[in-house]
Image (spheres, helix red, strand yellow):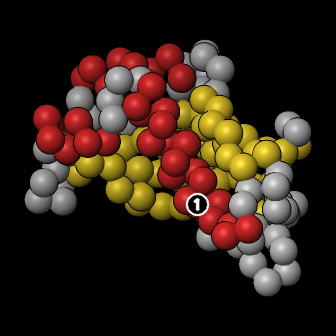
Amino acid sequence: MSEPHRFPVRIYYEDTDAAGIVYYANYLKFAERARTEWLRELGHPHQALVEGEGLAFAVRRCAADYVKPARLDDLLSIESQLSGLGAASLDLVQTVLRDDAPLVRIDIRLACLDSRLRPARIPAALRARLKPFLQGG
């Protein structure tokens, strides 16, 4: 099993709410950025999937457990681990960390869709790149 993908995020004023902590929905944005960069590093950026394969990933299900807040100027790390790999879907656990302490855990299922927004098989080349990251795989 490969190490989880890690993506750094610095917290800026625009990320915080009136109480000075990160607004809860922004963690989903951070997780999206981490997934996007992971796919790019694997050689399968979103734009290439859309233009070359006519495919895109969409969030099918998402659950977040908020443990501790992040604050202005914190340096966070978004850790992404593949927990399931179906024919047309990916399951991930994404953990937002500060100094390796978990702040938020996001369980997410992505569906692979064709241009008509119907389920489509994940391309074989991408499946092969993802498989080493599968927990327990």
- The reply to whether residue 134 is visible in this rendering is yes
Amino acid type, mark 1: Leu
For numbered disc 1, what is the local secondary structure?
A: helix
Q: Assign the C terminus to one quadrant of the image.
A: top right
Q: Residue at x 65, y 20 (%)?
A: 3
121 and 12: which is toward the camera: 12
Q: Assign the N terminus to one quadrant of the image.
A: top right
- With 122 as the anchor, is 64 left or right in this view? right
Task: Answer with the quarter of the image where residue 101 lies.
Answer: top right
Task: Answer with the quarter of the image where residue 41 lies.
Answer: top left
Residue that carries the numbered disc 1 in the rendered image:
28
78 and 86: which is toward the camera: 78
Q: How many marks?
A: 1
Q: Residue at x 68, y 46 (%)?
A: 9
Query: Farthest residue in the bottom direction?
Result: 18
Image position of 29 with respect to 84: above or below: below
Image position of 133 with respect to 80: above or below: above
- The reply to whether residue 65 is visible in this rendering is no
Image position of 55 with respect to 136: above or below: below
Task: Answer with the quarter of the image where residue 8 lies.
Answer: top right
Q: Position of residue 100 (x, y in %)?
A: 85, 37
16 and 1: which is toward the camera: 16
- With 35 as the anchor, is 2 left or right in this view? right
- Within 10 Å of disc 1 (Cα), the crowding (few <14, some 14-19, many 20+) is some
Q: Position of residue 105 (x, y in %)?
A: 71, 52
- With 64 as the anchor, is 130 left or right in this view? left
6 and 71: which is toward the camera: 71
Q: Residue at x 16, y 50 (%)?
A: 114
Q: Position of residue 69 (x, y in %)?
A: 85, 63
